[in-house]
Image (spheres, coloured by chain):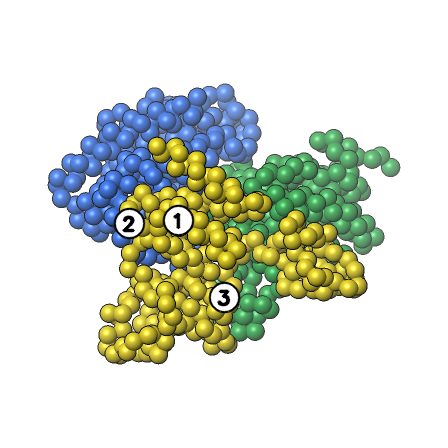
Amino acid sequence: MAKEESNREIVIPGEIVVSGEDYLPGEGTEKKGKDIVAMRYGLAEEVNKLVKIIPLSGVYQPRRGNVVIGRVENLTFNGWVIDIGTAENAFLPLTEVPRYVNKNELDEVMDIGDLSVVKIWNINKRGIDLSIKSRGLGRIDEGMIIKVNPNKVPRIIGKEGSMINLIKDNTGCNITVGQNGYVWVNGDSVEKELFAKKAITFVTEKSFVSGLTEKVEEWFKKEKGDKK
Amino acid sequence: MAQIKRPDGRKFEEARPMKAKVGIVPNANGSAMFSFGDTIAIAAVYGPKKMHPQHSQNPEKGTLRCNYNMISFSVNDRIRPGTSRRSTEISKVTEWALEPVVMIDNFPSMVIDVHIQILQANASTRCAGINAAAMALAHAGIPMRDLVSSVSVGKLDKTLVVDVNKYEEDWEDGEGATDIAMSFSSNNDELNHIQLDGHITSKELKEAVKMGREATKKIYELQKKALKNVGEEIEG
Amino acid sequence: MNETSNLTGERIKKYLSEGKRFDGRALDEFRNLEIETGISKNAEGSARVKLGNTEVLVGIKMDASTPYPDSPDKGNLMVTAELTPLSSPRFELGPPKFPAIEVGRIIDRVIRESKFIELKKLCIKEGEKVWTVFIDIYSINDDGNLLDAAGIGAVAALRNAKIPKYDEKTEKVVYGESSGKAVPLKKELPLSITAHKIENNWIIDPTRQEEDISQARVAIGQASGIISSMQKGDNGPITIKEFDEVLDLIEKTYNSLSSSIEKILK
């Protein structure tokens, strides 16, 4: 049976999550007669009779508006083909760059192998379209990239950024979390970046514990105390 | 009619002690181990991902690609590394056992790779492989209608038994050994896969399928518990 | 995004120039090592090795066969490695490609040239029957340095291996029954230790990311100060000075690795 938001239970494909006429099948579920049956592995969540599955695993599912981190795979005559960890490659057209780019200087803006923070502005049958027009987007010049399970990203960011801000403040690093599970950490020293990496790893390992923010605060106090 | 005694003393409907564990290959999207007694199988799932070469892509639905392999020292007589006709057939049969539950229409032009390695063999290897693969697919977050649970049922002379081991596979008394491998959609009475070799009447076969279905219920409980406790070895 | 990006590569190099690595190790430090032996019921010897997140399975099988004409009283050795697609999205199905062939051949040389296995003691009947030792290596998860992990697995599995019973009358091996004798081995462990060059630094036991950006590598098989095999791999050149450095580094590392392994195998 699905419990309330604060007490969610892991369900497996084919398992009956809840039974009852007035329950509605949300994402990852199907209604079979009176039963809401899970169609994938994850946490069952019921809010106002809508039952959905929050995935614990699985490859990144791209969504419009997502900010992700990708790697330039190829240059075409009018843009960059970027791998964002999905089966389909995504495309960043010249027109979605905030300044004029000459067709001959594409590789000076971004070359094969470069990483960039990009935004998904459209998904259709042809593929995924990207943009770097807003603030905070564009090529990554310095820093390190950590790969995490994309399903844990909401926890790393926290409610209204509370978790990621806690980590930034305690480590003195700039951190951009891509919805596709790639996290960019940029600090002014190796120690700070490794500390941020350690903190992020801690959050992903404990992601389904309740009161995680307090636990992370405690963890930081202890880690910093040990350093003295 | 004299009832046979199983060499290891098991009851007729009793499977060997089983173990299941989910999350054993960090690189994979999903992975699991399943064992029937000394038969141990591991499975790792990669995907969904773009299918190469392009001409193999199916624009209408995705592809489930299974590969079954026995490692060289899984048996007493060393197996030369490489594929065999037997492993190719079992790979295909494994695909057929799993495809009915995988919502493959969700992934046009993509492929989900399932790799199964048999680490140790004491009969019923394809069944252990299918059980591990089903858990690995779920662990990988693949949309699925159900899990798949697989078991072997044997007929030793005239007696039906659950979960055949190597000794029983070679039974020679009376009508000898009949070995039936079968896989079910765990929550339905749907038979996804069945193969047999031996000597059996259709009445006995119907009985065997019923027996197998019963046995897979316990297997399913193990698979479910392993998925709900990733990283822990579950015994049953 | 399976390949390591330029950015991560640059960061790895920056850290190395400060003597640091992503996982906090020193440049000449091995990751956490776990070894389990006797994990396979049907193998004559076996081991599972975990080096950080890299995991390999090694099995020893033995068979009675005819000796080679030029060594009528010596047993045979055959080492095979499979880099399984199960262990990494980078490995494909099919016959072994170069990386798997290289692992097999290098570990073969490490074991063979060090004379770790006393092949003369594996003679059943001179000129007619000798034991062949098969060492089969399987990757279970690749996070770099499969080669050294395979080498550790090979020696651990050999230490664990017992010669099966041989029936003189039928001239067949009776698998499942032991002769009671262990495979005859020398005392010192021959180990493969690989050093990778990243810019001006040599590192030991690279993770997959570190392997991706290394320019050259040197793998040395040695036992207690005697080098029995060596392979320089990849296409980056090394100076003679760098070569001298790496010889010293690997010799120094042998002692700590060897004692770690001996401690675990007790």
State the residue position of label 1. A169
Residue drawn at 47 percent across, 60 percent down: A179
Q: Quadrant of residue A222?
A: top left
Up-down relation of residue C250 to residue A192 (above or below): above
| Residue density around tag 2, few if under 14, some if 14–19, many if 20 or more, within 10 Å | few
- Which of C169 and B80 lies nearest the eye of the viewer? B80
Mark drawn on residue A188: 2
Which tag, 3 or 2, sits closer to the chain's start? 3
Q: Colour of chain A?
A: yellow
- Give SS at disc 1: helix
State the residue position of label 3. A62
**Is A71 situated left or right of C61 in this image?**
left
Q: Position of residue C53 (x, y in %)?
A: 43, 42
- Give SS at disc 2: loop
Circle 1 chain: A
Q: Colour of chain C?
A: blue
- The chain drawn in green is B
Residue drawn at 65 percent across, 53 percent down: A5
Tell me, yes or no, whether the two marked residues, 3 and 2, touch with CB atoms within 8 Å: no
- Which of A57 and B38 lies nearest the eye of the viewer? A57
Q: Position of residue B8 (x, y in %)?
A: 71, 31
